[in-house]
Amino acid sequence: MKLKIPFKSASFITDNSKECSESGAFLLTKQNRKFLEEAKSKSPAFIVTVKEVIEFFELDKIKIVGITGTNGKTTTAAAIYSILLDLGYKAALQGTRGFFANDERIEEKSLTTPPILATLKNLLEAKKRGCEYFIMEVSSHAISQNRIEALPFFLKVFTNISQDHLDYHKTMENYIEVKSSFFSDDSLKLINREDKNIKYSLKNCYTYALNEAASFIVTAYSLREGIKGIVTHLGESVEFYSSLYGLFNLYNILAAMASVKLITKNSLKEIAKAVESFGGVSGRMEVVSDKPLVIVDFAHTPDGMEKVLSALSDRELIVVFGAGGDRDRKKRPLMAKAAQKYAKKIYVTSDNPRSEEPLKIIEDIAMGFDRTDNVLAVLDRKKAIQMAIRDAKEDEVVVILGKGDEEYQEIGGEKIPFDDRKIAKEAVLSFCKN
């Protein structure tokens, strides 16, 4: 990647040794260190570190908030960003949904945590726009691959940890160790007290919880018609309301409120008022139809599915889901168990099969079912969605899981246009006509 910005006497910065020249600077990182000699052979104007770039452009003046966890990163980050904007601050947001600054989309969807040079580019753009805060999702891959090296995090937030990405980390122990390493220093941190897997430094640590003593605690709540609750911190208690659904979103909102309190010092009352304006994230518990009720969500792990489906457990559910190819196979039967725990009827289908055979993925999922009389395997995802909506009876809810607001299906190395929400809306229109 080449970033065309002036750095001392260099006209650009690159992290690619092949792009080096006398007019550019080479950004030396832990990822590309093995290409240092190749970079030197092209006589770059400078060889610089991430820390030197941050100091040169004074990017450390922006307060960076990093959120990591298996689930909840996107919603928590978006909620912090939304609350800050409503409180009158200038802020930027970087994550799965893209890059935003001051309520404007700057870049489309990308990696949860892009390469460090891309993050530096976004920090520069945020600074140019006067942003005081930079909210970013931090993936376990990014931590492991040093894609966040030298970033001066003002606050680090932990949501939760459950099985995911074992195709990369191999074991849960490795996965937990990587996540925990993010919280091993003395920086300001906010931890979900109820998740016992994570390890962290106690210095400058705050916690949040619903059922245990914590720095920020919800003392009462209701999950009917949205989320209503009372949050308490250091003797200050306030009521808050969110239009989001589910217990898992109560945790996300609590984490967001606590984060904003820690980084701004605004009163909880002011923060609670700003929460009401946050309408959620596209593709996360997104209602795409009211009659029949059709909900699309990104949940693609056993724990994620459990949280979404349990939030709707008072309804009769028809669930459509699959599992991604070339990813952790061990979670597939666990996803089946999560679906069967709550669903009246299940359509198992293709997700993003990538290089795997969709039928083989479905067979892996099916290993987790205790019974199959209410399970139907439909290889074609579009057809599965159409069948679920067509078959939905009055008061039944169709829940489509796995892809959220993704606008493609990845098959055999190609990204083919596909949007669960669009397919569902078209099916509803067809269903209503008939």
Image (cartoon, rainbow, N blue to C red):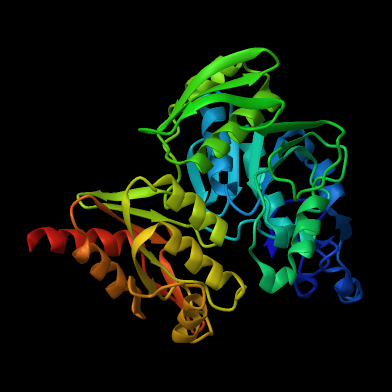
| Residue 274 can be seen in this image | yes
The x, y position of residue 179, in whole percent, is 76, 54
| Vertical position of residue 53 compared to residue 25: above or below | above
The x, y position of residue 384, in whole percent, is 30, 72
Name the one closer to the observer, 328 or 411. Answer: 328
| Vertical position of residue 386 compared to residue 194: above or below | below
Corner quadrant of residue 28: bottom right
The x, y position of residue 364, in whole percent, is 52, 80
Figure label count: 0
- Quarter holding the N terminus is bottom right
| Vertical position of residue 97 compared to residue 229: above or below | below
- Quarter holding the C terminus is bottom left
The x, y position of residue 176, in whole percent, is 76, 57
Say which residue appears at 63% left-offset and 17% top-offset.
266
Asked whether, in this view, residue 366 is left or right of residue 36, the answer is left
| Residue 42 can be seen in this image | no
Residue found farthest to the left:
434
Asked whether, in this view, residue 340 is left or right of residue 178, the answer is left
Name the one closer to the observer, 221 or 103. Answer: 221
Residue found farthest to the front:
370
Name the one closer to the observer, 46 or 265. Answer: 265
